Image: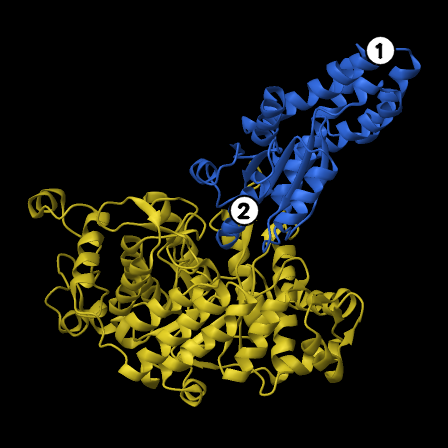
Amino acid sequence: MHAPEVSFLPPDKITVMRGRVLDLLEKRGVQMEHPEVTRRLAEAGATVDGETSNVRFPASFMEEVLARAPKRVELFGRDGARRLEVPRPEGGFLLRTGTGAHGYVDPETGSYRKATAADAAAWARLADGLDEVDFCAFPFVDGVPVPSADLHGLMAILSNTRKHAWIQPYTAESVEYLLNLAAAAAGGEQALRDAPRVSVIATALTPFSVKFMDLEVIRLAARFGVPVHACSLPSAAGTAPITMPATVLMAATEILAMLAAAQVMEPAVPVIATPLVFALDMRTGRGLQSSVEAMQGAAAAVQLMKQGFGLPTHTYGSGTDSPVPDGQSMAERALLGLLTGLARADILGGAGQLEVATAISPVQLCIDDELAAMIRRLLRGLEVDDDTLAWDELSAAAPGGHFLAAQHTLRHCREGFLPKLFTRLPRDAWEAKGEGDLAARARERCGALLSEPAPEPLPEDARREMAAVVAAADRRLAGTG
Amino acid sequence: MALDDIYDSILGFDAERTSELVRAELAAGTEVRAILDEALIAAMDEVGAQFSEGVLFVPEMLMAAMAMKAGLEILRPHLSESEAKPAGVVVIGTVKGDMHDIGKSLVGMMLEGSGFQVIDLGIDVPAERFLAAAEEHQADIVGLSALLTTTMPAMQATVARLRERNAGPRIIVGGAPVNRDFAQRIGADGYGEDAPGAVALARRLVADR
């Protein structure tokens, strides 16, 4: 079946851009502040400037890194179940919830508050129950010690969903605690390595730099056997040039530098290329994720990473610049999801997020679940064969006839996508039913899902160990308890 | 009128032309005060207003500020001691743990364009450094910037540390995750929602001292 796709970059431009990325890596390089990582890179053939920590990567070195880099990554849910393959063998994408948001839009009242640990737990339970969501990330939790907030966030996710969990670490000091927490939840370091229950994000400091913390993420991820999403978040006109192709070059360069770092670890850690493209609003200087240009940049970045470098790729496929889950939010995320899905991204992230990824909304997450199902269907494409061309039926048809009672129709009548949340009622019936608009229906679905029993708790010894890890983090990072 | 030409060249984002015209005006014997107030500062006021209205975009505002600064540099040696006194002394920086500096730098440039002396401490600045710089430079105002939610507590801690000194500088805060509510809660003297907002705020606070 022909899989539809969108292309912002024709093959000759991909070739040009690929060459430019390698040029940047070779001539300009990326600053990497981590003595052990740069030592390993130097040993492997990169050129490290001892004073500036700038690392330049010869083209031949990078080609080898790219050749050796795993092109498939496996992620797991609880107990080694719910295996996810990146890229999906059947095509399409995995869906990830928004991460790191500090705001929470209450599903019942629509009011805004700082996300709490209880909200994070509810978020995880919702993600657990929504069919299209593949993995769940934690918000920035308020009401806990700040230096260990990420621990509390991860705890809420691991305890409330059976699906794969995503770790966005906030400080260098918390990384090891976070991975220990994941190991405790998985039943030990070996269990975690065998079937990674979590994957973790390392982020570049655009332009052209990777901090110690993020290289520690890569180093520790290698030790624990946990895949890394190597992420670049360029802002066009801010930390990257204003034009999107340049922004895409910046992201690719930084991601490949992190890939090289991941490859010189022992064992090498699998990497998912994660360009998250932003554009600065020229009227205010504020970063946007769903401007027209950011969407184009996202699709182009996906294309370059996949077609230019053959890497599994992850980008924002949901989200809005609107602070509320309104019509603008729906329009922006639908456009973004479709574009990046058609660009053949392997993972689409940001489900449920609002206000440039600074807030999450359970109601929006429920709607995004529906949108993801639709986009997945759309991406399947159309089969063109004798049956779908209905040649016999067409040949036998005559004016005044219909196809409703045809055998052919009967055979196919249950294949169409059936929405859970979108309505198809005409006005009178819709009014009579009284179920309200999309937001109202999503609210109801959210409520229903949240009133379902929580997933079975983890085994008692796992829970005890997890609590101990979080307590240790509170004590040593936050000096409390 | 020639002062209008200087005004226009700032609004035309032309640093070179601004410098030339200021030089020419000085040579022609025009009053230094007039050049400063009626051309340079008046132009930046207009830039700020147009930016707040959404007529001018950020890069244009920055270029205008740079043009103004270029003109000011030509004027500087000719300013009397009182005229040379800046509108105020502002220490700015991004708080500890935060590496983001674009917004802060934008504010710094706008403040300089409006006649303030700006000491930019850069990024990842601990409270102690803000304190030391504020004391060393006798700052009227300390401006704190943060982009990450996770560094807002550092902003709070910095405000608290600065407050431990009596009669310290006024403190203003800004950045994507910050809002008026938060600013009030942590005891800041003001919140700037954007760069011109920060300038207006700075002017008000200096006037009130």
Residue picked out by circle 2 = B155
Seen at 27% across and 45% down, the residue is: A110
As drawn, the residue found furthest toward the left would be A432
Position of B17 relative to B186 (above/below): above
Q: Position of residue B43 (x, y in %)?
A: 70, 21
Question: What's the colour of chain A in the image?
Answer: yellow
Q: Is residue A159 above or below residue B34?
A: below
Q: Amino acid at mark 2?
A: Met
Q: Quadrant of the rendered structure where residue A141 is? A: bottom left
Q: Residues within 10 Å of mark 2 (few under 14, many from 20)?
A: many
**Would you name the residue on which mark 1 appears?**
B31
Other-residue count near label 1 (Cα within 10 Å), few / some / many at <14 / 14–19 / ≥20: few
Side of A172 where A328 appears, left or right:
left
Q: Is residue A185 above or below residue A473?
A: below
Quadrant containing the N terminus of chain A is: bottom left
Q: Position of residue A334 (x, y in %)?
A: 37, 54
Residue, x 42% and y 37% (percent of image)? B181
